[in-house]
Amino acid sequence: MKEVSVMKPTQQLVRSVLFKFEGKSWVVEQKDARLQLVGQGRSACVFRIAGTNRVLKVFYPPFVKIAQEEAEIYQQLAGISYFPTLHESGEGYLVIDYVEGFTFYTCMATGRRVTEAHIKEVDRALQGARERGLNPSDIHLQNLIVTLDGSVKLIDVARFRQKKKCQQWSHLKKAFYQLYQKRYVPKKWPVRVMRIVAELYKKKRLPRFR
């Protein structure tokens, strides 16, 4: 008797997600009603799965192979409380904890204060990753989350195996201590201004961070 292949519930959700390339970016064209879009990045979209505290991260067609790399990195980070737990992975997707809170980026856009305690938590998280043999890279404001209880979580770890030394976090810390903490510096920044600063940083046109 021929064995019938049964698709797992998660795989059904993954198959329901259809992307299309529009303009200069990928957009979600179709998805299962149980999936709520909560984040969109350069290589994937993240959906909260209805009725759970988990998210489904589905990679765009050109970036499907990144899923396995990121899954392996999450496995290396297992047990470090600063990172979400990986629950499942497969071709082009991951299932991890849903982290409720505010990214550092959102904090700056809304005037929520990022504290020195938050900065030190990020440092401890990155040190924990280094002790597991990883090289934390691509640390930016949208990958750092202040949870509802005030602690910090780091997401999007796909680039934690890069060989080159990444200066982004050290530069962010420098900006925090030399600028953000100053009494006269506003704690709420217009999104437009933050985008301009980010673009100048990428082009190495900020004198303090060349």
Image (cartoon, rainbow, N blue to C red):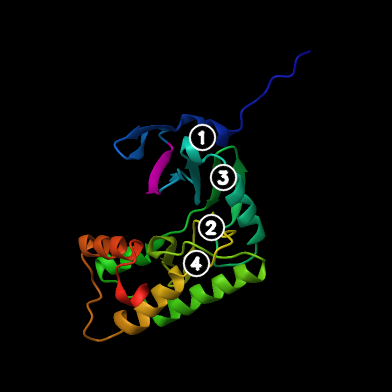
Identify residue type, mark 3: Ala
Which quarter shows the N terminus?
top right
Indicate which disc, 1 or 4, sits on the residue closer to the N terminus.
1
Of the residues tagged 1 and 3, which is closer to the observer? 3
**What amino acid is labelled 2 in the image?**
Val
For this orientation, the residue located farthest to the bottom is 183
Q: Residue at x 29, y 69 (%)?
A: 108
Earlier sequence position, callout 2 versus callout 4 = 2
Q: What is the CA distance from the residue labelled 2 to the residue labelled 4?
A: 13 Å
Location of mark 1 (residue): 14
Give the number of the disc on residue 67: 3
Crowdedness of circle 2 by 10 Å Cα count: few (<14), some, many (20+)? Answer: many
User: Can you give x and y, in whole percent of width and height, for residue 15 in the image?
Assistant: 51, 30
Asked if residue 68 is positioned above or below residue 132 in the image, the reply reads above
Mark 4 highlights which residue?
A: 166
Which tag, 3 or 2, sits closer to the chain's start?
A: 3
The residue shown at (56%, 37%) is 10
* For the residues bearing labels 4 and 3, Cβ distance under 8 angstroms: no
Could you tell me the amino acid type at mark 1?
A: Val
SS class, disc 1: helix
Name the image quarter holding the C terminus: bottom left
Q: Which residues are the magenta region?
A: 34-41
**Dot 4 amino acid type:** Cys
